[in-house]
Structure formats: structure tokens, C-alpha cells
Image (spheres, rainbow, N blue to C red):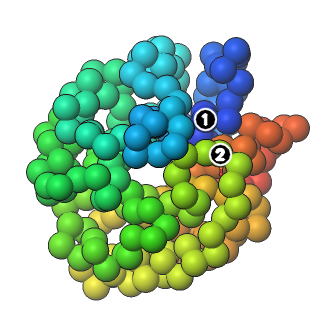
Amino acid sequence: MSRLISPSILSADFNNLGKDILMLNQSEADWIHFDVMDGVFVPNISFGLPVIQHVKKIATKPLDVHLMIINPDPFIKPFKDSGADILTVHFEVCNHLHRTVDAIRQEGMKAGVCLNPATPVHFLEDIINEVDMILLMSVNPGFGGQKFIQNTIQKVIRLRRLIEEKQANVLIEIDGGVNFETGKRLFDAGADVLVAGSFVFGAEDPKLTIHQLKNV
Ligand code: DX5
Ligand code: ZN
């Protein structure tokens, strides 16, 4: 199992985004997480392709793009062209998930599938061997700074069991309400990657917080 940190720029200072990206370059962050929201799948609108294109020019870490949009298929190539390295789609919006995951990999990106808090892990049985990552939401998607949903720990344990049963080569990423306390429990339960937005960017020393989160 790995212990990776993917800070979410949803909580960065958009008036000084370049500065925050340079900070992440110098930090122990492994990836940079982008929360793309369409105002339809989730009750919020964030940012899209141009922001990712600009960050790509200065970022030295892989771009981990989380699409909270209802119709991801036509945007797979545009996100690749904008610089995404990992592209994650929601299980709840994909009528033909196998095809969508395949299209992401065909573009040369790592493919992730995300589950909302109410979507059970066993729905992944028949796709787990085709993906690179499963993202479990530990809050209802749409906003940073929400409270961690405790049931996520049980989901991580069940997902780790499924991955072992299926001998799948898949990372488990968790998104929402991550701090030192929930982060430690998530790593102990078998998570590989923690997304953290408000906890990192709201900290007095974000670089130190990333270091400490990695070593909880
Ligand atoms: C929520 C987003 C998260 C969010 C996490 O829809 O997917 O990535 O930025 O924020 P925190 O870490 O503040 O809970
Ligand atoms: Zn996210």
C-alpha cells in the first residue's frame, strides 16, 4: 500500500493560484487534485479546462482530475489535451462505465472511478480489474470543508477485501473531510491516497501539514 497525498486546489487562493502550485511543487504532495463541477451533478460550479491548462505549465506533479459532471465522455480528450494524468469519473453518471474507462486509458491516462457515499462498494465487482484507481467520497460531493462521513472507513475495508479477492492492481483514494485524525484511520484501513483541501490550504504551514499528513 502507498501513502500518497493529493491536495485539492478547490481550497487554494485563486487570486494567487500560481503561488500555491509552486508551493505544492516544493512540498511532499504526490499529485495535485482538481475538482471539476458542473452545477448539475453537484450543487456547485468550480472551474474547468483553462485552469488545468495553466496549472500544467508550472506543475511538476501529476494532475489528478476528479470530474463531477453528468456527461464526461465528450470531455475525455479535452482533459487529456489540457494536461490531466489521472481522470476520475463518477459511477453514478456513467451508463456505459466500461466504455468510458476504456476511453480514458486509450488516451493514455490512468482511469479512476468514484463512488458517492451512498453507492456500495460491491457495485465495483465487474469493473475493478479494468481501472487504475477507485475514489471513495467521504462527503457528499460539491463543497470543500464538510464533515467526514464515518461509514467511509467500513467502505475502505470492504474495498481492500474486494481488491485482494480480485487480485486487482488498484489504488484506493479518499476525498472529503481528511485531517490528521481521519487520515490516520483511513491509511490504517487500507487507503493509498488522501485528497485534502481545506485542511492543507487552511493550515498556517501547508507544506508542513502535507508532510505530517503523509506520516500520520
Ligand atoms: C468535494 C471535493 C473535494 C473537496 C475536499 O466535492 O471533491 O475534493 O475539495 O475538500 P475538503 O478536504 O475540504 O473536505
Ligand atoms: Zn475531489
Asked where in the image residue 152 lies, by quadrant, the reply is bottom right
Mark 2: C-beta under 8 Å from nearest atom of ligand 1: yes
Mark 1 element type: helix
Q: CA distance from mark 2 to mark 1?
A: 7 Å
In this view, the residue in front, 165 or 176, is 176
The image position of residue 136, as x and y in percent, is 46, 63
Q: Which mark is residue 144?
A: 2
In this view, the residue in front, 199 or 91, is 91
Q: How many marks?
A: 2
Residue at point 62%, 24% (across, down)? 21
Residue marked by disc 1: 10
- Which quarter shows the C terminus? bottom right
Q: Give yes or no for contact between labels 2 and 1 (Cβ–Cβ under 8 Å).
A: yes
Mark 1: C-beta under 8 Å from nearest atom of ligand 1: yes
149 over 67 or under it: above or below: below
Residue at point 34%, 21% (across, down)? 82
In this view, the residue in front, 157 or 67, is 67
Whether residue 23 is visible, yes or no, is yes
* Amino acid type, label 2: Gly
Mark 2 element type: loop
The image position of residue 128, as x and y in percent, is 25, 68
Going by the image, does 169 lie left or right of 53?
left
Residue at point 26%, 40% (across, down)? 71
211 over 172 or under it: above or below: above
Residue at point 36%, 40% (across, down)? 69
The image position of residue 24, as x and y in percent, is 64, 31
* Amino acid type, label 1: Leu
Going by the image, does 121 lie left or right of 199?
left
207 over 139 or under it: above or below: above
**Crowding at label 1, few (<14), some or many (≥20) Cα neighbours within 10 Å?**
some
Whether residue 3 is visible, yes or no, is no
